[in-house]
Amino acid sequence: MKKIIQISVWLLLFAGIIVITGFAVTEKRTVKCIKVDVFVNDNQPITFINRAEIYDLIQKDFGTLTGKFMNTINTEQIENRLDQNPYIHDANVYTSLLGEITVDISRERPLLRIINEFNESYYLSETGKPMPVKENFTHRAIIATGFIGEKYSNIMHRNYVYSADSVNCRSMLTKLYRLASVLEKSPYLNGIIEQIYVNNEGDIELVPAQGDFLIILGGIDDLEIRLENFLAFYGAGLPKMGEQKIESINLKFKNQVVCKKSNKVWNQQTSL
């Protein structure tokens, strides 16, 4: 008897769901869209795209939604179109039985500005997504210049998030993304390093905000260890030597900081 009651309850619930679903489908055929609300879910006060521009994107591709029957509006297509925008990280579109459409947007935030060897400029976002520059708007971010061969038109649909087990980690843009991510997490390093430069041999060099010397990083293997070595030297060794006499600080070796000073090489062993 108890089993029969349980089956009956499940059947009633299932029937109720079918009725509600059928009601919702019927309502969409008779209800018209009365408004479209766009909500931006991030704390960026000024960025590459704003609410008004998102409204314009929707209207350009799908026309004016207000006044249309809800069953004629394809929210999945709207989401896909917005997700294709390089300045948008994620878009979710919801509808209500009252005829309201809600568009929730999270935007990309630039992490690194690239100026490649062709003098073309673009950004990499926090999520590794290439972003084109926008006329009359510049976002403050660390700059990487030099022998960077990737053009925006060839990479615009790729992603450069660093992953140690990914083939993509060999890409220079992935290395630069990884470096910029580490620098941003350290306010102290971020204040010291003004620019990233890729030389003609593919080595990464760091340009400090103060001083005429270069910091030769090389690649990004053991990145945190080598940057810790640099900070240790920067705080203790550099003041004693005098930064005005140093030509370069080489961090290419895991447990060494090698300085070139007045045509001489000074080698500091580290034990981290």
Image: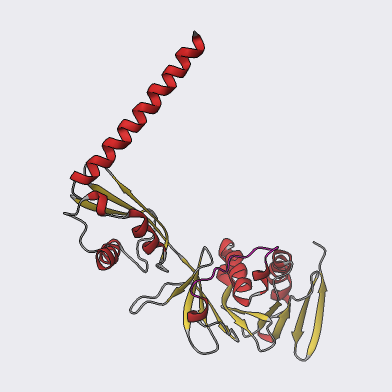
Q: Nearer the viewer, residue 75 or 50?
A: 75
Residue shown at 66% from the left, 89% from the top: 200
Q: Identify the coloring.
A: secondary structure
Residue shown at 29% from the left, 61% from the top: 51
Q: Position of residue 79 (x, y in %)?
A: 37, 58
Q: Would residue 234 be found to the left or right of residue 19 on screen?
A: right
Q: Nearer the viewer, residue 228 or 60?
A: 60
Whether 162 is among the magenta residues is yes
Q: Position of residue 123 (x, y in %)?
A: 48, 74
Q: Position of residue 22 (x, y in %)?
A: 29, 36
Q: Relative to 82, is 28 above or below?
A: above
Give the magenta part as a residue range: 156-166
Numbered circles on residues, count: 0
Q: Position of residue 169 (x, y in %)?
A: 66, 69
Q: Relative to 212, is 64 above or below?
A: above
Residue shown at 55% from the left, 88% from the top: 117
Q: Residue furthest left?
A: 67
Q: Would residue 70 be found to the left or right of residue 154 on screen?
A: left
Q: Relative to 226, is 43 above or below?
A: above
Q: Residue furthest top?
A: 1
Whether 29 is among the magenta residues is no
Q: Nearer the viewer, residue 78 or 47?
A: 78
Q: Quadrant of residue 106?
A: bottom left
Note whether residue 97 is visible.
no
Main secondary structure type of the part rendered in magenta? loop
Q: Residue furthest bottom?
A: 263
Residue shown at 79% from the left, 61% from the top: 272
Note whether residue 160 is visible.
yes
Q: Would residue 26 be found to the left or right of residue 133 on screen?
A: left
